Image (tube, rainbow, N blue to C red):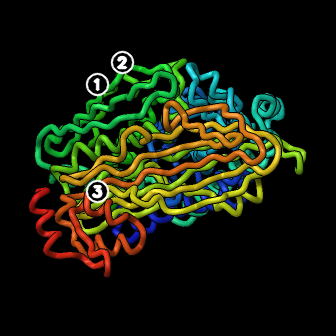
Amino acid sequence: MKDLDPITLAVIHNGLIQVCNEMDLAFVRSAFSPVISEALDRSDGIYAADTGELIAQGELGLPIFVGTMQFSTQAVIERAKDVKPGDIYIVNDPYLGGTHLMDVKFVRPFFYQGKLWSWLANTGHWPDLGGSVPGGFSAHATEVEQEGLRLPPVKLFKQGKLDEEILSIILSNIRIADQRIGDIKAQAAALTIGEQRLTDLLDRYGEDVVSRSIKELKTRATDQMKAKIADIPDGTYHGIAYVDSDGVVDEPLKIDMKVTSKGDELQFDMSGSSAPCRGPMNSVLATTKSSIYLAIKHIFPEIPINAGTFEPLKIKDPEGTFLYAKYPRPVSGCAAEVSQRIAESVFNALVDVIPDLLFAAPAGTSGNLAVGGYDPARDKAYVMYVISGGGYGGYQGSDGLSNGCSTIGISKTTPIEVMEQYYPILFEEYSLHEGSGGAGKYRGGFGVNYKIKLRRGSARASMVMDHGRFGPVGALGGADGGTNKVSIEIAGKTYIPPHLSKDQDIQIEVGDSVSVSTPGGGGFGNPYERNPELVAQDVVRGYYSREEVKQRFGVVLDRAKGEVNVSETEALRAKLA
């Protein structure tokens, strides 16, 4: 058998990724919901026929879905019967390799020359799956049924034909059902594109070459990951991260992460974390594992993504903690919030030992805000879902990015012009959250402020966010970033959620508004080592006030000229040090 040459291997590798990229683009271009078409909250991938292991994922997909789609595909394989070409399974059950209920997976068997060759799968965030509040983010849920409709793997399409009976059950249990059919057809169409493109790839290069390439790519990804891990000094490293609360009990939840580097393996132990919680901040095992995968991929971004990437990562099942949710624990906050705290705990554990590869904690919240109601001008109901950016942490050599996407994905805020067009709201503010970047030699980036006013009808607002109690952690002497803040103006009075970042079913009327300030990133390194001229520049740009930089960076600015007072700065820094 002829050995694979490097050029062929590279072509096959990029060809598989391109198949997934085209699925992503087809999904985005034809989806009805702005959260998919504009915010890009979706992912597509190719998975092994027998094991469900990840073969390839698109470059445009959310990292958090890297692991979870592998697990959900495996759940389909275990339950699939009489599989035929054109079948598509739908599944969103969190306990069967999922995330929260709003992340709906479609899984399609791919046949080549009459043989089941692989599975194609994608995930799309549906803006509503029923449940007690519009949007599914029930901050006070105490069981999963309150969060929406739970679907085990069932055939929604049978040999290419949509099952109208199953569809009617789904549409009868969710809000704005008339809009879901567009997303369903878009999600299915993306898999059809994947089938066509993967067939073209196999026709061109041959099944044997492609299959051997996939096997070799998996081996190489494992070897590359092992080589990177081998450079981490052996030892056990400890990282802590906190979730503000579970939305029901107003107490923080601790993620206690122990990372052991041993040769070319990393071992992860979270057994010291908080017990299962009453509210929706429990994390299912698939999401917990995927959060660790994406954290390590952040550290070593050059390693290709496939099942081999994860083999050197040995994760101890965190049974008995809130990071191993079992039915009927509510889980709506796991994918968008707890996942980011898990990743943060990995970063916190390793930043001291590999500081050149890491950074201070990022904002680490998707800022999930759902507003649902009835628009009298359009004579129809709506559910608006807002995700928002925040500051990245500073890192060796540079300040953190401002208004960056969340740790778990490339999803972005839907353009405000689009939201104002779709929904009866008006953005009265969209600005930088000044002062939110944590002080450091390299400061954290800044979050954002936004304010939404209701223009027509009545609505209900719900939110599941985080970092309202604790700001993103600084690294190597850097200060923590600013916290998440939420306030609601109702009939001229200000309401602050008791849990700071989580609440639900807040009734708002015309003229009422919701204001959100997202977290800034943590600072990296000693703030008193920051170049005073850069501090002065930040003040000129309005990022900090004079008093803030004096307290945080030990820099004194001349009031008349706004320039650095060198002598007073040196004296103050010497005193503070």
The quadrant of the image that shows the C terminus is bottom left
Q: Secondary structure at mark 2?
A: loop
The residue drawn where x is 34% and y is 24% is 274
Residue type at the position of mark 1:
Ser
Residue type at the position of mark 2:
Gly
Residue 13 as seen in the image, left or right of residue 292: right
Tell me if label 2 and label 1 are in contact, CB under 8 Å: yes
Gap between marks 2 and 3, in whole Å?
34 Å
The residue drawn where x is 63% and y is 46% is 514
Q: Secondary structure at mark 3?
A: loop
Q: Mark 3 packing: few (<14 Cα in 10 Å), some, or many (20+)?
A: many
In the rendering, which numbered label is found on residue 126?
A: none
Which of pointers 1 and 3 lies earlier in the amino acid sequence?
A: 1
In the rendering, which numbered label is found on residue 320?
A: 2
Gap between marks 2 and 1, in whole Å?
8 Å
Which of pointers 2 and 3 lies earlier in the amino acid sequence?
A: 2
- The residue carrying mark 3 is 523
Which of pointers 2 and 1 lies earlier in the amino acid sequence?
A: 1
Residue 577 as seen in the image, left or right of residue 437: left
The residue drawn where x is 38% and y is 36% is 289
In the rendering, which numbered label is found on residue 271?
A: 1
